[in-house]
């Protein structure tokens, strides 16, 4: 073998004992770099594994939400099919088809109010809560008696608690057919006058008990909305009334300009 042609760095060195050793030039900084790369790679692997777990959890949550939406969609389809069958057969709709809106904060409070107090009843589909103790009036009179004043005092206490659950108050006045006013007048005009005066009487009494007037509104229906027959006195007494409704704050109400601002440009 011609040893003269070997590169200088690769020439073998003859040990005293006759063994050949290959001269390997491995810079120290290469070893350090290799060790450092191993540490960085492990750190990246741990971070990637954690990110993968987070993504997996997010996917599982989204799949659960999709399944929930599918279940709701199936229920709505079933209700729609039942409605179409009922309408097609002419039997009428045997169940409530009202559109259910997401519950608002005030609607939940109204529902809780009805659950905790017997004098209130809540209708979920309309978001309206009714004060069941209707205010009664004598024939031809808009004045309150002691029983009605006591009922309104209880109502005022509720409306003052926690801001009155944030609800608006609608007072609807009614009359029996052909009530006689103090001067003996009896007509449909008198019925309208009495129904409006009764609603105003209730509003003024509640305002005197600390309920803000800006939260209240009145409506008059004359004798057009009876709850009983006018053929006998018991029915007429039931029709001489004022009804009180609590309406959730988020619901648009005609007459309250801040609830339907687009109509007042």
Image (tube, rainbow, N blue to C red):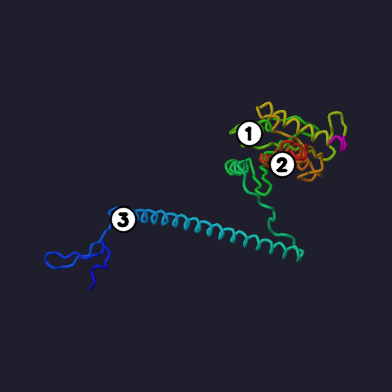
Residue, x 38% and y 55% (percent of image)? 46
Q: Quadrant of the N terminus?
A: bottom left
Q: Secondary structure at mark 1?
A: helix
The residue lying toward the viewer, choosing from 108 and 223, is: 108
Q: Quadrant of the C terminus?
A: top right
Question: Can residue 99 be spotted in the picture?
Answer: yes
For residue 30, the mark is 3
Apparent side of residue 169 relative to residue 8 in the rendered image (left or right): right
Apparent side of residue 187 relative to residue 83 in the rendered image (left or right): right
Q: Which residue is mark 1?
A: 159
Residue 152: x and y in percent read 67, 32
Q: Secondary structure at mark 3?
A: helix
Residue, x 66% and y 47% (percent of image)? 123
For residue 252, the mark is 2
Residue range highlighted in magenta = 186-191
Q: To which quarter of the image does residue 238 belong?
A: top right
CA gap, disc 2 and disc 1: 20 Å
The earlier-in-sequence mark between 3 and 1 is: 3
Number of other residues with Cα within 10 Å of mark 1, as a class: few under 14, some 14 to 19, many 20 or more? many
The earlier-in-sequence mark between 2 and 1 is: 1
Q: To which quarter of the image does residue 104 belong?
A: top right
Residue 74: x and y in percent read 62, 62
Q: Main secondary structure of the magenta part?
A: helix
Residue, x 68% and y 26% (percent of image)? 208
């Amino acid at each position: 073998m011609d040893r003269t042609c070997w590169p200088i760095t690769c020439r073998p060195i003859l040990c005293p004992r006759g063994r050949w050793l290959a001269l390997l030039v491995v810079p120290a900084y290469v070893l350090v770099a290799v060790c450092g790369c191993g540490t960085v790679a492990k750190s990246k692997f741990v971070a990637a594994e954690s990110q993968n777990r987070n993504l997996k959890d997010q996917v599982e949550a989204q799949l659960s939400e999709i399944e929930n939406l599918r279940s709701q969609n199936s229920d709505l389809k079933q209700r729609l099919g039942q409605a179409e069958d009922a309408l097609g057969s002419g039997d009428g709709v045997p169940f409530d088809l009202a559109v259910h809106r997401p519950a608002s904060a005030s609607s939940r409070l109204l529902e809780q109010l009805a659950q905790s107090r017997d004098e209130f009843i809540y209708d979920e589909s309309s978001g309206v809560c009714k004060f069941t103790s209707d205010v009664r009036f004598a024939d031809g009179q808009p004045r309150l008696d002691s029983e009605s004043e006591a009922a309104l005092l209880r109502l005022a206490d509720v409306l003052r608690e926690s801001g009155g659950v944030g609800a608006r108050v609608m007072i609807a006045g009614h009359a029996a057919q052909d009530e006689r006013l103090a001067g003996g007048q009896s007509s449909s005009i008198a019925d309208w006058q009495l129904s409006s005066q009764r609603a105003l009487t209730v509003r003024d009494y509640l305002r005197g008990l600390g309920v803000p007037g800006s939260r209240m509104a009145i409506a008059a229906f004359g004798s057009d909305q009876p709850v009983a027959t006018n053929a006998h006195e018991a029915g007429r007494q039931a029709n001489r009334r004022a009804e009180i409704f609590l309406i959730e704050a988020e619901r648009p109400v005609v007459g309250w300009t801040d609830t339907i601002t687009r109509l007042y440009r």
